[in-house]
Amino acid sequence: MKIMKFGGTSVGKPERMHEVAKLITRDSDNKIVVLSALSGTTNTLVQISDLLAKGERESAKDTIQQLHQHYLGFINQLVSKPENQEKARVIIAEHFEFLNIILRISFSEALNKDILAQGELLSTKLFSVYLSEIGVQHELLPALEFMSIDANEEPQLLAIRKKLNDLLEKHKGTGIFITQGYICKNAKGEVDNLKRGGSDYTASLIAAACNATVCEIWTDIDGMHNNDPRIVDKTVAIEQLSFDEAAELAYFGAKILHPTCIWPAQQENVPVRLLNTMQPDAPGTVITKEAGSVGVKAVAAKDGITAIKIKSSRMLLAYGFLRKVFEVFEKYKTSIDMITTSEVAVSVTIDSDTYLNEIVRELEPFGSVDVEKGQTIVSIVGNEIAQTDHVLQKLFDSLSEVPTTMVSYGGSPHNISLLVPQTYKTKTLQLLNTGLFGL
């Protein structure tokens, strides 16, 4: 079984859906096709939900109508036969009837999750209509019947495996299945989701659950690049990465792959391929247990970082001091990205300032606390990077003009991370592209 996931840009226009249909029928392999919502849809649904939360129902109504018109225009180019256009209109009417009904009821978090689920439900149903029009035999496999998370919002892999395989067994002989990315049921049995980037996660979980031969992630770029192509002119696709290298890159800012996507595939040793719907014959990037080569492979950057420095000559070396500091972050469920220590200070970085004021208040009894927002973590990732000759020399020679406030080195054999002001992000990535890759 092959898993093929297509993101929003890959299905965002009727002609792109047509191309996806060609891609999934290029070979005779059994496959499960995971679709995201049409590009822009989830953002619009978030906007609708936010307007309803603020009580701005007229604005929400206008936004719903605009989205409705977009979908009506979409299906006119997606399918050509009148009977299939009518099927598509009925599907759209059903989902937009729901969106209009919610204008008249009280807003809640559960309702918010229902709203956000509409994009994937629409894209898969409309794609199914198109596949039927062109004579492709397939089954629509509702993700809400097998994808689930527990009370801690963690996927229930064992339950997913059983439910999914039971469904596949019911449709034995079917070669192509279509399902929704992102959406799931929670521990209460309510509609929920796997958060942003969740379609990648869905694909990887399905791949692990059915022991797939490969998990293909199709986007609009030909694999994982050695640097951010939106910022740096000369970048190249990486041929092969290990699961650990890919996880580091995804966590520290490589946008092509969601950080959660790696873990399920890694558990079952399912290769992940990153491929380009615009250039389907490009080799892309393969992610496997083996790294393929040693040395620096890529640079990634993560914005929106806040640095917190706790300085205390009296307490830092005291037994249990660091534990007490970490307990503050644990209390507020705020993860730490980087940490450095000296004799009198400890510095950490966080990527969420939701509870920043509360965290600072609870840290102040330990010593003076300084906060610096607007920072970027730049990570240099590669296999056995700590053992690579001259990597630190090349790194710091490249960045002699960039103020670096923190360095994390040695905690991972695959990663060296630097903290720089966000205003220096572009310059840093460009300098590293020249200094480390000669591009």
Image: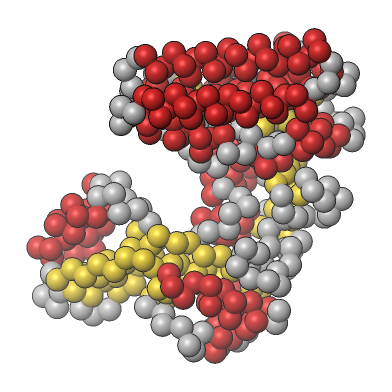
- Which quadrant would residue 142 be assigned to in this image? top right
Q: Which quadrant: the N terminus?
A: top right
In the depicted structure, whether residue 87 falls above or below residue 398:
above
In the depicted structure, whether residue 50 falls above or below residue 406:
above
- Percent position of residue 62, x then y: 47, 27
- Which quadrant would residue 59 be assigned to in this image? top left
- Percent position of residue 157, x then y: 55, 30
Count all numbered tags in the image, as a single digit.
0
Which residue occupies the foreground of this view, 2 or 195?
195
- Percent position of residue 388, x then y: 62, 79
Residue at image position (58%, 81%) is 431
Q: Which quadrant: the C terminus?
A: bottom right
In the image: residue 52, left or right of residue 21: left
- Percent position of residue 64, x then y: 50, 25
Which colour style is shown?
secondary structure
Which residue occupies the foreground of this view, 327 or 49?
49
Residue at image position (18%, 59%) is 360
Residue at image position (52%, 13%) is 97
In the depicted structure, whether residue 71 falls above or below residue 226:
above
